[in-house]
Amino acid sequence: CQNQGNFHSSFFFAGTVATTIGYGHMVPQTVQGQCFLLIFMLFGIPFFAMLTQSISSEINIHVLQRKKERDRFTSNSSY
């Protein structure tokens, strides 16, 4: 990578690869780096997808529970 040794740049690069954004301004220069990145992508992208699915599932469950509570409250308080 062009900015070697910078933790922030490394973390940003790993995040853009795992989220499939990949801006393209930082790329591995060596064959070993390219092979490592390929392996990282094979595991990182599905892991990030599972993480996103888990978070969205939990949010959906929370929203549905709140909606059920609100519907139950409005149906019980008829005037």
Image (cartoon, rainbow, N blue to C red):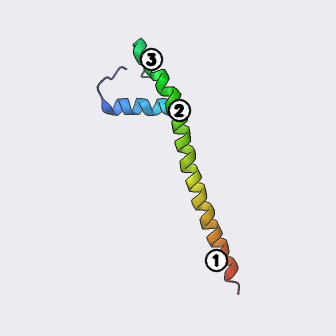
Q: Secondary structure at mark 2?
A: helix
Instruction: Please state the horizontal and vertical placement of residue 29, each as a whole percent of the image.
Output: 40, 14
Q: CA distance from mark 1 to mark 2?
A: 42 Å
The residue identified by callout 2 is: 45
Q: Quadrant of the N terminus?
A: top left
Q: Residue at x 43, y 21 (%)?
A: 36
- Decide: few, some or many residues near mark 3? Use Cα within 10 Å; few <14, some 14-19, many ≥20: few
Q: Give the mark, 1 or 2, whose residue is nearer the N terminus.
A: 2
Q: Is residue 22 visible?
A: no
What kind of residue is marked 3?
Answer: Gln
Q: Are the residues at dot 1 and dot 2 in contact (C-beta closer than 8 Å)?
A: no
The residue identified by callout 3 is: 34
- Decide: few, some or many residues near mark 1? Use Cα within 10 Å; few <14, some 14-19, many ≥20: few
What kind of residue is marked 2?
Answer: Ile
Instruction: Give the answer, above or below, for where 11 lies relative to 4.
Output: below
Q: CA distance from mark 2 to mark 3?
A: 16 Å
Q: Is residue 13 left or right of residue 43?
A: left
Q: Residue at x 70, y 78 (%)?
A: 75
The residue identified by callout 1 is: 73
